Image: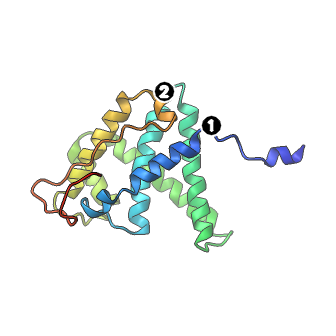
């Protein structure tokens, strides 16, 4: 009977939902055209942004609140596993996880409290671009985040929980020449 307690909880689609978020956060358009640093920190920031938006949306509906909580747990499990795979020791992992949780919820709070696109762009510039965003890209990422918030808000919560996420196309900085040279399919 004890071994039954050690068995993993039934997935109920959380893995597919998390995979859809990871896939969106890893799209090259963010790193190429919107100049998000293609570093561990840059990828972390996009994961926090995308996962946080979905967690917040699921948390606003009674029927999907538990799914939102389990999605956040999947994010933290992934971060824990990543730390361990990169050689962080067992003694240090809890301290780092506390910082990750603080970053996740702090950024989620900052993005939700932004109030307008300029404030959201400022928060994104500070977090995603470490305060050094190239001209127009933080504003373009803010426009994308606002469109994602609207699309998630209009989506059926049950569809979101089933990993059917209506991600918008990222906007491009006005007049900016992208490093990819084209805005083709994203």
Seen as rendered, the residue at the extreme right is: 1
Q: Nearer the viewer, residue 120 or 80?
A: 80
User: Does residue 163 appear anywhere in the picture?
Assistant: yes
Q: Eyeballing the image, is 133 above or below 61?
A: below
111 with respect to 177 (left or right): right
How many angstroms separate mark 1 from mark 2 (CA)?
18 Å
Q: Residue at x 51, y 49 (%)?
A: 19
Query: Which one is closest to the eye, mark 1 or mark 2?
Result: 1
Q: x and y percent of residue 73 in the render?
A: 59, 47
Q: x and y percent of residue 182 in the render?
A: 19, 59
* Colouring style: rainbow
Q: Eyeballing the image, is 127 above or below 8?
A: below
| Helix, strand or loop at mark 1 | loop
Which quarter of the figure is the N terminus placed in? top right
Q: x and y percent of residue 3 in the render?
A: 86, 48
**Quarter where residue 84 is shown:** bottom right
* Residue beneath disc 1: 12
User: Does residue 48 appear anywhere in the picture?
Assistant: no
Q: Nearer the viewer, residue 164 or 147?
A: 164
Q: Eyeballing the image, is 34 above or below 114?
A: below
Q: x and y percent of residue 129 in the render?
A: 30, 63
* Residue beneath disc 2: 61
Q: Residue at x 29, y 52 (%)?
A: 186
183 with respect to 1 (left or right): left
**Quarter where residue 79 is shown:** bottom right
| Helix, strand or loop at mark 2 | loop
Q: Residues within 10 Å of mark 2 (few under 14, many from 20)?
A: some
Mark 1 or mark 2: name the one nearer the start of the chain.
Answer: 1
């Amino acid at each position: 009977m004890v071994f039954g307690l050690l068995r993993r909880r039934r997935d109920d689609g959380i893995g597919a939902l998390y995979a859809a978020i990871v896939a969106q956060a890893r799209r090259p358009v963010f790193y190429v055209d919107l100049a998000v640093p293609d570093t561990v920190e840059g990828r972390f920031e996009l994961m926090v942004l995308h996962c946080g938006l979905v967690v917040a949306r699921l948390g606003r509906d009674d029927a999907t609140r538990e799914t939102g909580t389990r999605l956040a747990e999947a994010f933290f499990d992934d971060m824990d596993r990543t730390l361990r795979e990169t050689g962080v020791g067992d003694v240090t992992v809890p301290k780092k996880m506390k910082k990750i949780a603080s970053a996740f919820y702090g950024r989620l709070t900052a993005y939700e409290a932004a109030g307008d696109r300029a404030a959201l762009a400022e928060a994104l510039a500070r977090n995603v671009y470490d305060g050094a965003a190239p001209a127009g890209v933080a504003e373009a990422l803010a426009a994308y985040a606002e469109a994602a918030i609207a699309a998630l808000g209009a989506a059926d919560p049950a569809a979101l929980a089933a990993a059917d996420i209506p991600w918008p196309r990222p906007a491009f900085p006005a007049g900016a020449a992208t490093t990819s040279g084209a805005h083709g399919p994203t």
